[in-house]
Image (cartoon, rainbow, N blue to C red):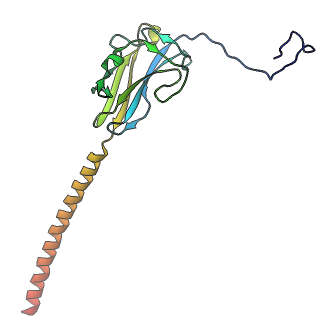
Amino acid sequence: MIDASTVALATATSNEVSVTSKVAIPATVKISFNKANYAPGEVGLIIITPLDAAGAALPATTVTSALASGGISSDVGLNYAGASIASSLADTTATTVAYNGTTTVAGAETIVFTAPAGGKITLTAKGGSGLPLAGQVAITASATVTDNAAAALAAVTALATTVASLKTLITTLTNLVLKIQKKVKA
């Protein structure tokens, strides 16, 4: 690139620059979590990503009816900062951003939530009328909430059972040794 009509008149030049331009037409939509596993009370993101026919995320845009009526359904009630996020999940429009941040993902819309007490979170949705018929399909995403306290309690319970079994074996062995001692003395 030069800043003049001819190379002879140019006062500034730069290297070649490649630019790709394409029409951003949504073909499908994807929902996901930012992590596969959460701890109870951990803040997480639900990510809604409209994709073009090649599977690439779209630039910052708004896709009206990216999701079918009802938006995203969750099998557990999800909250953030003590308030339900049901209205955010019910939204059918996907408004994506052009940058990554703490609660944003480039080319996607994000919904912030607080992980519940434990178990699995499953989200379901369907592509909406803002997509071609081929993109109006059911989609799902899931994540696991691992309650480390419950796992620790299970380990302690298993250990207590093992200790009780060992105590029984030691008592039986002690009684056997006492019997043998009596017979040896007799």
Residue shown at 12% from the left, 84% from the top: 180
- Left or right: 68 in relation to 181: right
Q: Quadrant of residue 74?
A: top left
| Outermost residue, bottom side | 186
- Left or right: 126 in relation to 54: left
Q: Quadrant of residue 114?
A: top left
Nearer to me, 28 or 134? 28
| 166 lies above or below 78 | below
Nearer to me, 51 or 94? 94
- Left or right: 155 in relation to 103: left
Q: How many marks?
A: 0
Q: Give the percent coordinates (x, y) of residue 183.
A: 8, 88
**Quadrant location of the N terminus in the rendered image:** top right
**Quadrant location of the C terminus in the rendered image:** bottom left
Nearer to me, 79 or 64? 79
Residue shown at 49% from the left, 11% from the top: 62
Residue shown at 32% from the left, 16% from the top: 87
| Outermost residue, left side | 186
Q: Quadrant of residue 145?
A: top left
Q: Give the percent coordinates (x, y) of residue 27.
A: 50, 13
| 169 lies above or below 62 | below
